[in-house]
Image (cartoon, rainbow, N blue to C red):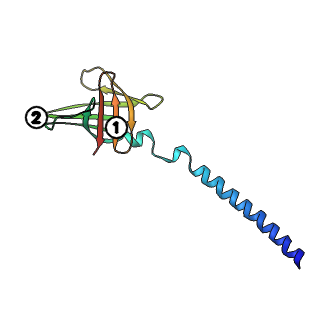
Amino acid sequence: MKNLMKKYQGNGIRLFHLVFAAIAVTLLMSCSKDDGPSQTDLIVGTWTLEEVNGDNVRSDLIVELTIERNGDYEEDINDSGSVSRFTGEWEWNRDEDEITIDYDQSFEDWELDVELLTEDELEVDDGDDTYLLSKN
């Protein structure tokens, strides 16, 4: 009887190790980098300009950028009641660390290095200025 118990205990321990190894592999695979939101998931939405070069935006200036998944871009500027709207298309570079805005109006393309991108903050740099935006 003792030998029979040892035999089943040994199988139980081996089975436990197999089950534990399978669970560990499953958990490791489920924690991959691809599980979080993509760069596009994070950047799509409406953003409000909060700071330029570390300085708060004037209270009478409201700048909103709307970035849509389909590549459309809209920029609304309310400067002391004077409202302007600019539209265009946006796209990522290959590494998804820079976006380019191609305006419908006759402006040059605007290239922005994405310095920070979270669910509620976006910081971009155009080579001259750094802009901090928050998601609405």
The residue at the point 29 percent across, 38 percent down is 133
The residue at which mark 1 appears reads as: 122
The residue at the point 29 percent across, 20 percent down is 108
Q: Does dot 1 land on a helix, a strand or a loop? A: strand
- Which of the 4 image quarters holds residue 107? top left
Q: Is residue 60 above or below residue 101?
A: below
Q: Is residue 99 above or below residue 32?
A: above
CA–CA distance between discs 1 and 2? 24 Å
- Which of the 4 image quarters holds residue 109? top left
Disc number for residue 98? none
For the residue carrying disc 1, how many other residues have a C-alpha within 10 Å: few (<14), some (14-19), or many (20+)? many
The extreme bottom residue here reads 1
Counting every numbered tag in the picture gives 2
- Which of the 4 image quarters holds residue 60? top left
Give the amino acid type for the residue marked by disc 2 in the picture. Answer: Ser
Whichever of callouts 1 and 2 sits on the residue coming sooner in the sequence is 2
The residue at which mark 2 appears reads as: 80
The residue at the point 74 percent across, 61 percent down is 17
Residue 28 locus on image (x, y percent): 61, 50
Residue 23 locus on image (x, y percent): 65, 58
Residue 119 locus on image (x, y percent): 37, 45
Asked whether 32 or 17 is in front, the reply is 17
Q: Does dot 2 land on a helix, a strand or a loop? A: loop
Q: Is residue 123 left or right of residue 39?
A: left
Quadrant in which the N terminus is drawn: bottom right
Give the amino acid type for the residue marked by disc 1 in the picture. Answer: Leu
Q: Is residue 91 left or right of residue 2?
A: left
Asked whether 102 or 35 is in front, the reply is 35
Residue 124 locus on image (x, y percent): 34, 31
Asked whether 64 or 113 is in front, the reply is 113
